[in-house]
């Protein structure tokens, strides 16, 4: 809890240029409201015991009361503008920091973290922090100022009556202490349940086609209901505490007013207290009802905000990928692996073991092998989506583990197995490879990827908007657009990871033929399960269970028995 509260205070201090004038305006607003009962007291006394100048006193007090009202309105507008702006700025800053941290975290973090956790942090948790800053802290300051001045004034007006009417306050303190801990932990559990519900909704929407294909609409709805019920029950655990807390405060506030009526009314009747003093006393005691009510509201908001801030801070404290100085040399694209071994975190056995090869700048390497042989792992390590062991993988003689990540990834155009396209136009998706590319360059790379003609058939051509993950395109079209995007990137190394697996043989032939000239001067690593995709490359490596079992050119591998020749013969037979 202390971490979350410190985080809230830190954001208040960070926006102090807005917070300080807002608090000053809040003090003015409260001051006007607190002086008003004393003005009313003089007016009531003048009415109840009129003197020769009673009319003048009443008119003067009426004008003064009007001035205090105007001052309250203006000051309230000012503090709301400044303090709510500070809370919104904090909300914006938190969301930006969350996105920045999410983009800088290593891939290993996402192998153990669900997308819904980050989504919940950026929505519910950030909103809770904003409410704690906007209204929780403000109402807390407001209530404290009201309570302090009102109590002092009550004791000045009638200290005996003040002691009697303040009798319920110790009970209020006890109730607040008990509720404090309960609200914090229950809200944390509510947010965890919301994460589970968000993840289930995201998964169901993403997998809608599969659910429909297997007629699992009702089954998935039942699963969603289970997560929804869990979130509902956690929310109700929190609401029960909150629902009991506020009525108790109202009861204690009403009890104080009842005590005032009983004892203060008797004093007025006996002439021990003027009617104006009683009116002012009852007004100030009524003002104390607001701090008591606000105490519960503030407690709820601040505890929720502190719990959410602690969760956000945990995310922000995650170590990001290390930043190393950039190398001064220009890269040509030579790739060398020396006894490269790698095991995924938490996995049994190595994904790669003692893998060695050398690809000169401008050369090409084909990687083939059965599923799970480690082909894609090698692409991950080259781009440092996972970190290879030091001294095992080199780019132009420099250990990739010692290279600046941004600089390293600028040298590599990587097309992953799963083609990912954003919900933008085709041209915007392509320009991820080069934001400054003009339409002619876009068409050029799309012609190389054998997709330009198909784009031309769309009603809006290259400005056609794609659905989520490119859902409006076929699997082959998505793969060829991803290939075109990589070709657009001016990088010395091109890594194609089973890029044309969803493309028919004829389209694949066209693409491979078009790439021959384009790959000149660029180092190419082609991962494929099709022999036709790698047969024209300078060298080919066959992987099995993470180890190199064969290497050579297409002709050399066909001349020796083994996996490569068997795969070639099988694929030729299928063709």
Image (cartoon, helix red, strand yellow):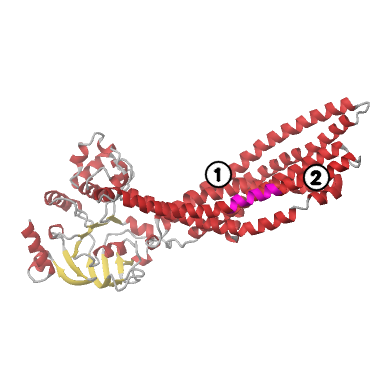
Question: Element type at marker 1?
Answer: helix
- Segment colored magenta: 241-251
Quadrant of the image containing the N terminus: bottom right
| Percent of width and height locating residue 472 | 26, 42
Q: Name the residue under label 2.
A: 260
Look at the image and tell me in which quarter the C terminus lies: bottom left
Question: Residue extending furthest right?
Answer: 52
Q: Is residue 345 visible?
A: yes
Mark count: 2
Give percent across and percent down for residue 378. 27, 65
Q: Give the left or right position of residue 548, taking residue 249 as reference.
A: left
Magenta span includes 414: no
Q: In this view, does 356 lie above or below 488?
A: below
Marks 2/1: CA distance? 42 Å
Q: Tell me the quarter of the picture where residue 303 sits.
A: bottom right
In depth, the one of 471 and 463 nearer the eye is 471
Q: Which of 476 and 357 is in front in this view?
A: 476
Q: Which of marks 2 and 1 is in front?
A: 2
Could you tell whether 552 is left or right of 64 in the image? left
Q: Element type at marker 2? A: helix
Q: Residue at the spot x=8%, y=65% of the render? A: 555
Tag of residue 88:
1
Whether residue 4 is visible: no
User: Is the Cβ of the residue at disc 2 closer than 8 Å to that at disc 1?
Assistant: no
Q: Is residue 75 above or below residue 9?
A: above
């Amino acid at each position: 809890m202390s971490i979350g509260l410190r985080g809230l205070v830190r954001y208040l201090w960070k926006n102090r240029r807005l917070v300080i004038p807002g608090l000053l305006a809040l003090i003015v607003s409260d001051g006007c409201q607190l002086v008003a009962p004393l003005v009313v007291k003089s007016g009531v006394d003048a009415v109840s015991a009129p003197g020769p100048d009673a009319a003048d006193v009443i008119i003067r007090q009426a004008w003064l009361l009007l001035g205090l009202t105007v001052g309250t309105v203006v000051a309230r507008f000012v503090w709301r503008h400044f303090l709510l702006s500070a809370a919104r700025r904090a909300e914006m800053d938190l969301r930006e920091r969350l996105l920045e941290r999410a983009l800088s975290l290593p891939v290993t973090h996402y192998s153990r973290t669900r997308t819904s956790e980050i989504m919940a942090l950026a929505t519910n948790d950030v909103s809770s922090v904003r409410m704690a800053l906007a209204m929780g802290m403000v109402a807390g300051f407001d209530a404290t100022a009201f309570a302090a001045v009102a109590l002092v004034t009550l004791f000045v007006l009638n200290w005996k009556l003040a002691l009697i009417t303040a009798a319920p306050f110790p009970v209020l303190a006890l109730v607040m202490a008990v509720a404090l801990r309960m609200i914090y932990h229950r809200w944390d559990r509510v947010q965890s349940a919301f994460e589970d519900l968000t993840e289930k909704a995201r998964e169901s929407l993403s997998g809608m086609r599969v659910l429909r294909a297997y007629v699992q609409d009702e089954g998935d709805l039942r699963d969603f209901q289970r997560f929804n019920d869990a979130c509902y029950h956690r929310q109700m655990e929190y609401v029960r505490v909150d629902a009991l807390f506020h009525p108790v405060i109202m009861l204690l506030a009403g009890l104080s007013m009842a005590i005032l009526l009983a004892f203060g009314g008797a004093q007025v009747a006996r002439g021990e207290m003027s009617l104006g003093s009683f009116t002012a006393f009852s007004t100030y005691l009524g003002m104390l009802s607001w701090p008591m009510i606000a105490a519960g509201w503030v407690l709820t908001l601040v505890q929720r905000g502190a719990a959410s801030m602690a969760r956000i801070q945990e995310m922000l404290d995650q170590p990001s990928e290390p930043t190393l100085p950039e190398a001064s040399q220009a890269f040509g694209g030579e790739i060398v692996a020396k006894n490269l071994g790698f095991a995924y975190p938490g996995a049994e056995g190595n994904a790669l073991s003692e893998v060695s090869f050398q690809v000169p700048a401008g050369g090409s390497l084909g990687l083939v092998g059965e599923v799970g042989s480690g082909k894609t792992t090698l692409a991950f390590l080259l781009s440092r989506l996972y970190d290879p062991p030091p001294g095992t993988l080199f780019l132009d003689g420099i250990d990739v583990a010692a290279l600046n990540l941004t600089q390293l990834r600028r040298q590599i155009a990587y097309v992953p197995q799963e083609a990912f396209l954003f919900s933008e136009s085709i041209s915007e998706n392509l320009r991820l490879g080069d934001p400054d590319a003009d339409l002619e360059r876009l068409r050029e790379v799309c012609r190389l990827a054998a997709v330009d003609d198909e784009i031309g058939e769309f009603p809006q051509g290259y400005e056609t908007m794609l659905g989520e993950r490119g859902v409006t395109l076929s699997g082959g079209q998505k793969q060829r657009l991803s290939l075109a995007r990589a070709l657009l990137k001016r990088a010395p190394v091109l890594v194609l990871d089973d890029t044309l697996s969803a493309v028919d043989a004829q389209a694949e032939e066209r693409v491979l033929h078009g790439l021959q000239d384009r790959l000149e001067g660029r180092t190419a690593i082609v991962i494929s399960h099709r022999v036709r995709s790698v047969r024209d490359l300078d060298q080919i490596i066959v992987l099995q269970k993470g180890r190199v079992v064969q290497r050579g050119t297409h002709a050399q591998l066909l001349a020796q028995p083994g996996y490569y020749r068997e795969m070639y013969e099988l694929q030729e037979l299928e063709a």
